[in-house]
Image: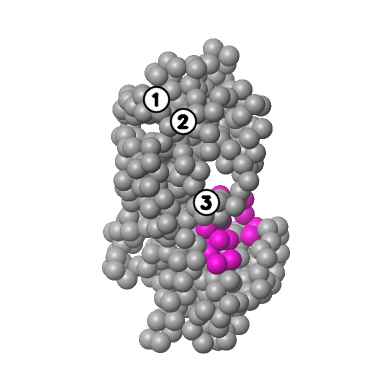
Amino acid sequence: MKIFINGRFLSQKLTGVQRYAAEIVKAMDSLLASGEVSAPLRNAEWTILAPIDASETLALNAIKVRNVGRLSGHAWDQVDLARAAAGGRLISLANSGPVLHSDQLVVIHDAQVFRRPDFFNWRYLAVHRTLDRLLARRAMIATVSDFSRRELAAVLNLSAPQIPVFSNSAEHFAATKPDFTILDRLGLTPHRYFLSVGSMTKNKNISLAIEAARMLERPDVPLVVVGGDNNKVFQSKTSVADPGLILAGRLSDGEIAALYARALAFVFPSLYEGFGVPPLEAMLFGCPVIASTADAVRETCGDAAAYFDATNADELRQRMLERLAAGAIADDERTRQLDRIAAFSWRKSAECLLQFLSVQRER
């Protein structure tokens, strides 16, 4: 039996979706190498098929990597990958795959293109709505949360119970060594700043966190915003006259880990998510979380976060004031965080995916 993995994610900029694909692949590889899978899967020929321009690499033992084709982007998916994967089972972990491949599992992370078209331009909507609908007819669809399962079932006319869930995790961040020199470089006092991490895409809603910080009027407890494009977006709107806001730009994982570890609280104002990984990353470092009431975020964070309406800056300001009054994280808060962290792991998700493949093969 031949099992192929769509390796287009190895040629893409690293975001949450690409991180998910990489971590699931590494976890599956570990299980295959240790023999902790069914015999048919253990004896199968596993290969990642990647574009010729793939720049990312993974250290794997049981799964081979092969570069194929000459195209890139969606064209590579639909032509080069479809041809190379013919005759085998294909696993696509990053929202897309060749619509002509009939034996394929595709992980679609959310239904944003259907539920929040205001987040995208019309070309992106046209491509991804069409692709999702075609894949729903041709492939087995999986996703990353119960919320996304319900959403995808509704918009793609699928049965929710037939959509398996292979969750995200944040445990990859646990091995990151914090670089605490970032606090001095940004002029920060430990536990005297709020933190937001996210780009200026509409769903991340960072502008609401900035509005709440300005309403808070506490320049001694600034909001630090980490994101690759945020300085450019806000440079015309912020200045030294905004002492309660620090735009840190793009930082390394070590620097972000240090900010998580020393923040008074992590603020996550997202309007729509398929899962919501950053709050779990914050919890890894014992950082209190103030999160929006977006359904997937509540599913991820459970009772380990304080919540606010993502359209209400004053309500976020109130949660920030409450955190200021409460101070450092309490023991019971930390216990709830640890429970949420333990609920998600790449190994568990990889085990579920491999088990799903075994059952599907038996059918």
> Hey, which quadrant is residue 227 in on the image?
top right
Q: Kindly report the distance in space between the C-alpha atoms of the residues bearing marks 1 and 3.
A: 30 Å
Residue topped by disc 1: 324
> Element type at marker 3?
helix
Q: In this view, does 108 lie above or below 304?
A: below
- Residue 295: assigned label: none
- Residue 264: assigned label: 2
Name the residue rendered at 53%, 34% in the picture. Answer: 262
- The amino acid sitting under disc 1 is Leu
Q: Kindly report the distance in space between the C-alpha atoms of the residues bearing marks 2 and 3.
A: 24 Å
Q: Is residue 26 magenta?
A: yes
Residue 305: image location, x then y, percent: 35, 41
Q: Are marks 2 and 1 in contact (CB under 8 Å)?
A: yes
Name the residue rendered at 50%, 52% in the picture. Answer: 170
Q: Is residue 310 magenta?
A: no
**Nearer the camera: disc 1 or disc 3:** 1
Residue 308: image location, x then y, percent: 32, 34
- The amino acid sitting under disc 2 is Leu
Name the residue rendered at 47%, 42% in the picture. Answer: 286
How many marks overall? 3
- Answer whether residue 84 is visible to the viewer in this image: no
- The amino acid sitting under disc 3 is Gly
> Taking 113 as reference, is 48 left or right?
right
Q: In which quarter of the image is the N terminus?
A: bottom right
**Mark with earlier residue (2, 1):** 2
> Taking 302 as reference, is 354 left or right?
right
Q: Kindly report the distance in space between the C-alpha atoms of the residues bearing marks 2 and 1.
A: 8 Å
Residue 77: image location, x then y, percent: 57, 65
**Mark with earlier residue (2, 3):** 3
> Element type at marker 2?
loop
Residue topped by disc 3: 16
Report the magenta residues as a range. Answer: 10-27
